[in-house]
């Protein structure tokens, strides 16, 4: 299987003029926030001039949104999606420990930058193995870990992680925490963003992509108190890497209380509903606990590949998870969408049963 990400609605859909329902990529089903649509003219008006190369207003808006503790502009780095920031962060470390299975880009980036890679595998019930991570820290310069993790939906247990953070802080190691999906946990305290104030070793990565349903806008950012590291990474960036549509989107959506509240209500309900219903499908052997807007499942009596094709016949795209390091073709991941779409997925699965 060569396609490594979800969201390939092009091969069997767009390019063949076929409408598909995409359960393979994990985007807020509430769609583009109205607050952005209502102000799109403002972005258009800015198209004819270069953005502020220092993005001062944008950084000010981000600081307001993310942290209850004060941050300086020098603690932030902006990227063309979280992916750019992940790539940059990984580029500066020779020896990297990646908690897997996880987003494939961590490993792709590390390979691209010739880093030596070590892995810490999740436990059988898809939780982080904190002892294993701790035991490997001496051999690496940086740990890459997601909160919540993709594809498993598990989060970092703060208490169990304490020893790891303290060790990294004392031994000059960096912890890159990918929080691209953090809003879906519904708990502000789950994020490590406020801990940035106390720990220089933390490098938190966020994006507008998932929660604000803006993957086409390509906007992400990193937060870290190690200004030396941030400045080094900034020097590797092209100027004006954020376009005026992303600037306008951030300006309005981060303050869009109505969208945020509606999204929180939706995810709270559907995060319970869909996993419970998936447990009733005969060929789903295990539904893993999720803190995000997707669910990882282990199949029995059918492969992920077969299920993918059977769903595709019904116009539903699911994510085969066999190409995540540590998983095999008995795993699939489903996005959590709104109730009507979740019922469509369940209906498609029930027809296969
Ligand atoms: C865990 C994780 N982090 C980051 C990204 C990339 O985010 P962006 O589209 O903002 O680059 C993804 C995309 O699927 C992801 O799953």
Image (cartoon, grey):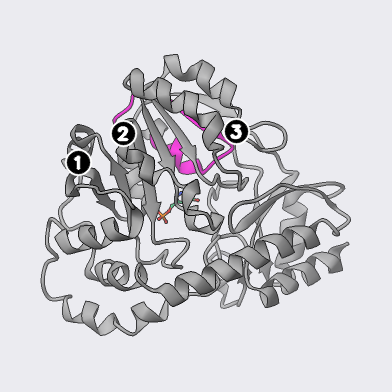
Whether 281 is drawn above or below 111: the answer is below
In space, the residues marked 2 and 1 are separated at their CA atoms by 10 Å
Rendering coords of residue 8 (x, y %): 54, 61
Nearer-N-terminus badge (3/2): 2
Mark 3 or 2: in front is: 3
Mark 3 — residue?
128
Mark 3: C-beta under 8 Å from nearest atom of ligand 1? no
- 268, 53: nearer the viewer: 268
Residue under numbered circle 2 = 91
Q: Label 2 crowding class (10 Å Cα cut-off): few <14, some 14-19, many 20+?
A: some
- The image quarter containing residue 200 is top left
Is residue 130 within the magenta segment? Answer: no
Mark 3, other Cα within 10 Å: few <14 / some 14–19 / many ≥20: many
Q: Is mark 1 within 8 Å of ligand 1?
A: no
Out of 72 and 234, give the one closest to the viewer: 72
The magenta span reads 90-109
Q: Residue at x 60, y 70 (%)?
A: 266
Q: In this view, does 1 lie to the left or right of 211?
A: right
Q: Work out whether mark 2 precedes mark 1 in sequence or the reverse, and give the earlier one.
A: 2
- Tell me whether circle 1 and circle 3 mark residues in contact (CB < 8 Å): no
**Mark 1 or mark 3, whichever is nearer to me:** 3
Name the residue that disc number 1 marks. 236
Answer whether residue 90 is visible to the viewer in this image: no
Cα gap from disc 1 to disc 3, whole angstroms: 32 Å
């Amino acid at each position: 299987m060569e396609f490594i990400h979800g969201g390939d609605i092009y091969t069997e859909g767009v390019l063949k003029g076929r409408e598909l329902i995409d359960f393979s990529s994990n985007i807020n089903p509430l769609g583009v926030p109205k607050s952005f649509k209502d102000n799109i003219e403002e972005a258009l008006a800015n198209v004819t001039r270069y953005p502020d190369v220092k993005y001062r207003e944008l950084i000010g808006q981000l600081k307001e949104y993310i942290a209850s503790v004060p941050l300086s502009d020098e603690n932030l780095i902006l990227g063309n999606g979280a992916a750019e920031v992940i790539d940059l962060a990984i580029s500066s470390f020779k020896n990297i420990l990646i908690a897997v299975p996880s987003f494939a880009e961590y490993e792709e980036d590390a390979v691209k930058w010739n880093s030596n890679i070590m892995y810490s595998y999740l436990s059988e019930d898809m939780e982080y193995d904190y002892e294993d991570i701790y035991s490997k820290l001496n051999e690496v310069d940086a740990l890459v870990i997601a909160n919540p993790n993709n594809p498993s939906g598990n989060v970092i247990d703060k208490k169990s992680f304490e020893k790891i953070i303290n060790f990294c802080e004392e031994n000059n190691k960096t912890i890159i925490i990918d929080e691209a999906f953090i809003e879906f946990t519904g708990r502000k305290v789950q994020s490590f963003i406020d801990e940035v104030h106390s720990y220089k070793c933390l490098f938190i990565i966020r994006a507008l992509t998932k929660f604000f349903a803006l993957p086409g806008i390509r906007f992400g950012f990193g937060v870290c108190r190690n200004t030396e590291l941030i400045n080094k990474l900034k020097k590797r960036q092209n100027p004006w890497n954020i376009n005026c549509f992303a600037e306008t989107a951030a300006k309005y959506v981060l303050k869009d209380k109505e969208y945020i509240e509606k999204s929180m209500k939706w995810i709270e309900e559907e995060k319970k509903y869909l996993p419970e219903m998936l447990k009733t499908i005969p060929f789903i052997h295990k539904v893993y606990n999720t803190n995000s807007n997707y669910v990882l499942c282990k199949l029995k009596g059918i492969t992920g590949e077969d299920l993918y094709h059977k769903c595709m016949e019904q116009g539903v795209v699911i994510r085969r998870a066999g190409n995540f390091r540590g998983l095999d073709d008995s795993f699939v991941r489903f996005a959590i969408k709104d109730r009507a779409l979740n019922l469509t997925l369940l209906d498609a699965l029930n027809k296969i049963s």
